[in-house]
Image (cartoon, rainbow, N blue to C red):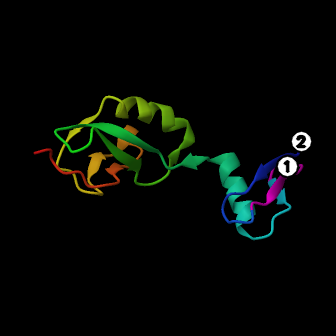
Amino acid sequence: MEQEMICIVCPQGCRLKIDRDENNEIIVSNHNCARGPIYAKKELTDPKRTLTTTVKVNNGLHRRLPVKSKDEIPKDSNFAIMEILQDVEVSAPILEGDVIISNVLDLGIDIIATRALDKRS
């Protein structure tokens, strides 16, 4: 069964055509660069995303702190991590890159601050 996917690796936005051969190997066509097949195979077999959100801040200049996963996380872990992060509260001051949660869900990936935040005076 052939399916289509738009490649997001480069600005060309190729409409990839994906099929499987008799050995169930993924065959990708209609790509204009070598990155298209790599993207499609990865997306079909092990989809990952960078998670971005905010967490609550005590005594900071702002009430929320933007955070992200330091590396890509498995797509099916997004909601579980979001549930953990909704209960997280941090205290200012915070520096960009500070680890907010280390090794979230035992994935070996940290959740880090994406900006500095000073303490409220």
Apparent side of residue 46 relative to residue 18 in the rendered image (left or right): left
Magenta segment includes 14 = yes
Could you tell me which residue is drawn at 36 percent across and 34 percent down?
A: 85
Label disc, if present, on residue 20 of the rendered structure? 1
Apparent side of residue 120 relative to residue 34 in the rendered image (left or right): left
Query: For the residue marked with disc 1, what is the amino acid?
Result: Arg
Q: Which residues are magenta?
A: 13-25
Mark 2 lies on residue: 1
Residue 74 drawn at (x, y percent): 53, 44
Q: Residues within 10 Å of mark 1 (few under 14, many from 20)?
A: few
Residue 37 drawn at (x, y percent): 75, 61
First of labels 2, 1 by sequence position: 2
- Position of the C terminus by quadrant: top left
Residue 39 drawn at (x, y percent): 68, 58
- Position of the N terminus by quadrant: top right
Apparent side of residue 48 relative to residue 59 in the rendered image (left or right): right
Q: Nearer the viewer, residue 15 or 121?
A: 121
Q: Is residue 33 above or below residue 82?
A: below
Q: Are marks 2 and 1 in contact (CB under 8 Å)?
A: yes
Visible residue check, residue 13 = yes
- Asked which secondary structure carries label 2, the reply is loop
Magenta segment includes 104 = no
Could you tell me which residue is drawn at 49 percent across and 32 percent down?
A: 79
Q: Residues within 10 Å of mark 2 (few under 14, many from 20)?
A: few
Visible residue check, residue 27 = no
Q: Residue furthest left?
A: 121
Instruction: Kindly report which numbered mark, 2 or 1, lies closer to the viewer in this rendering.
Output: 2
The number of callouts visible is 2
Could you tell me which residue is drawn at 69 percent across and 61 percent down?
A: 38
Residue 50 drawn at (x, y percent): 50, 50
Q: Is residue 67 above or below residue 77?
A: below
